Image (cartoon, rainbow, N blue to C red):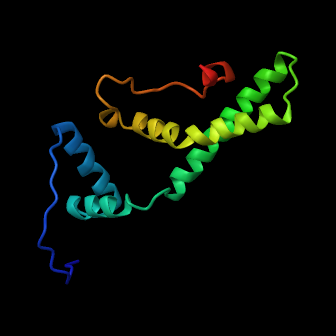
Amino acid sequence: MVSSILRTKSVTTKVTESEYERLEELASVSGVNLSEWIRGKLLGADRAGSEAGVVLEEVLALRTILINLVFSLGKGEPMTHEQMQALIERADGGKAKRALDRLAATVPEAAPEGQPENQGEAETEAEMEA
């Protein structure tokens, strides 16, 4: 399908051979050419908090809260309202970064250089306080 929109500007980036092959594969699976697929990703990327990203953030925050709550209760330590509120605030405060880290870990080439691909699991309360 030929677009009637005249596009006159370019945006470029350099990728490795394996990254390029992966991009072509993703575009092919989506049923569009590479340029259309990348354009869609670039223009869609500015939608802060895509549905999947928001869901992942919430799941990671809930996971952090649950692990810390079970850990505390497992030690026989009741959690006060203030402790629970602080735990929720810490989980909510770090959920976006953890979601981005988790997403980057799913695409090995996207992980920052020198950083392990898998950042590990949710933090325990002791790790969160450190």
How far across and how far down the image is residue 129, in percent? Answer: 63, 22
Query: Residue 21 vs residue 115: left or right?
Result: left
> Where does the N terminus fall, quadrant-wise?
bottom left
How far across and how far down the image is residue 92, in percent? Answer: 63, 42
Residue drawn 33% across the image and 55% down it: 29
Q: Residue furthest front?
A: 82
Residue drawn 68% across the image and 23% down it: 125
> Where does the C terminus fall, quadrant-wise?
top right
How far across and how far down the image is residue 58, in percent? Answer: 62, 46
How far across and how far down the image is residue 123, in percent? Answer: 61, 25
Residue drawn 86% across the image and 31% down it: 80
Query: Residue 22 vs residue 78: left or right?
Result: left
* Displayed quadrant of residue 31: bottom left
Compare residues 126 and 22 and report the one nearer the observer: 126
Compare residues 52 and 18 and report the one nearer the observer: 52
> How many marks do you count on the picture?
0
* Displayed quadrant of residue 44: bottom left
